[in-house]
Amino acid sequence: MNAILFGAPTALPLASFRRAVSAPVPWYASHAARRATESLHSAVNARSPRVAAALRRAAAHNVVARDRLFAALTEALGRDIAPQRHLARRHAALTATALADALPQAHEPGEPAGIAQDTLLCITGKRIDRRAIVRLLEVPHHACARFLERTGQRDPAALVAAIEEAARHAAAVLVAHIQGGLAYRLRSGSASVLLPAGEGAFLGRLRLLPQRRDGAPLPVIEAATWLHVAALDPSQIRARDVLLAGLPPAVLVAALPEAWAELRGNVMGDRRVRSGLEVLPFPLGENLKARLAIACCPPVAVARLALGLACADTLAAEWGGAQ
């Protein structure tokens, strides 16, 4: 059995962290954000033990065992989550995405939970069986509340829909930074990003966190706040427009470097890194092995599958499972 189970990133509290001075989030927006996270909590608690039990099933190295595993995972996920099967010539993958209440990396002591997007990834074949729980996007309580405040929304469903939209764009943003022409932006291990959501966009950071068991960085996107399109500067509007242009994934990833060339981030830099959160620089230059390790790590693998830029056979070959 060649099974590796990757856990979602562990939230790391930093007692020294303090937010930049800004207008407080109104109580009604904070309350609505709490309602949104609480609405996810019970479903997550009910689903997690079932999914964990299904993931502990024996390795599936033939079609019959694979179908039984996928059926068990589908049943464990419940009616509200529709898994996707990705069938290739020699391997098969199952992915399923859901939102969960979660604390972000380097959260404040006592900070309320936000919302994260978690994806189940399972790839099986004759000589490979790998299963992962992948976290690509974290939206802290502050960003959730800013969205509700600035849109005037009170319905938790509106916030959930905005985060799901941002998560769809996060895949292309991640691949463009790891495998495309935006890798230079990760020289410090942290880069400003923008994810369209509703009538505006979440602004945040893509970070390379030192949490992989093999020592390779683990990429995670955190949204810091939400702004209406009228509050975005010209560079941010261009960055948003290209993601909303409806381009094919391969074309979009190729177009992002030019469209994001002048994208402005927070002038103060990454406040969580300043407060002590450790990040790893992207290995530029001749360190090909290190770059490949990031390119085939579970979050990037999920993004490539979602965009149709990789298949189960490709990922299995990268992980050394193909014969």
Image (spheres, rainbow, N blue to C red):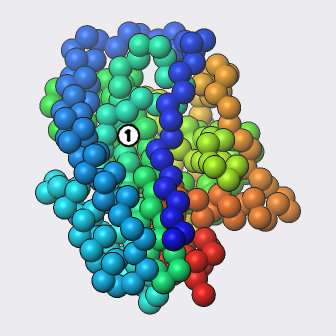
Asked whether 232 or 142 is in front, the reply is 142
Of all residues, the one furthest to the right in this rendering is: 286
Question: What residue is rendered at 35% in x and 25% in y?
Answer: 113
Task: Name the spot of residue 169 as percent of width and height, x first.
Answer: 42, 54
Front position in the image: 73 or 219: 73
Amino acid under label 1? Ala
Q: Report which quarter residue 300 is drawn in.
A: bottom right
- Count the marks: how many? 1
Q: Residue at x 28, y 46 (%)?
A: 49
How crowded pointer 1 is (Cα within 10 Å; few <14, some 14-19, many 20+) is rated as many
- Which is nearer the eye, 206 or 23? 206
In the image, residue 209 above or below residue 183: above
On the question of residue 181 being in view, the answer is: no
* Residue in the image at 25% along x and 11% along y: 27
The answer to whether residue 34 is left or right of residue 183 is left
Q: Residue 18 in the image: x percent, y percent? A: 55, 12
- For disc 1, the marked residue is 116
Residue 63: name its quadrant: bottom left
**In what quadrant of the picture does the C terminus appear?**
bottom right
The x, y position of residue 99, in whole percent, is: 30, 44
Classify mark 1: helix, strand or loop: strand
The image quarter containing residue 122 is bottom left
In the image, is residue 155 above or below residue 136? above
Residue 132 shows up from this direction:
yes
Left or right, 21 with reference to 202: right
- On the image, the x and y values in percent for residue 107 come to 49, 22
Q: Which residue is found at the position 68% from the left and 37% from the top?
A: 279
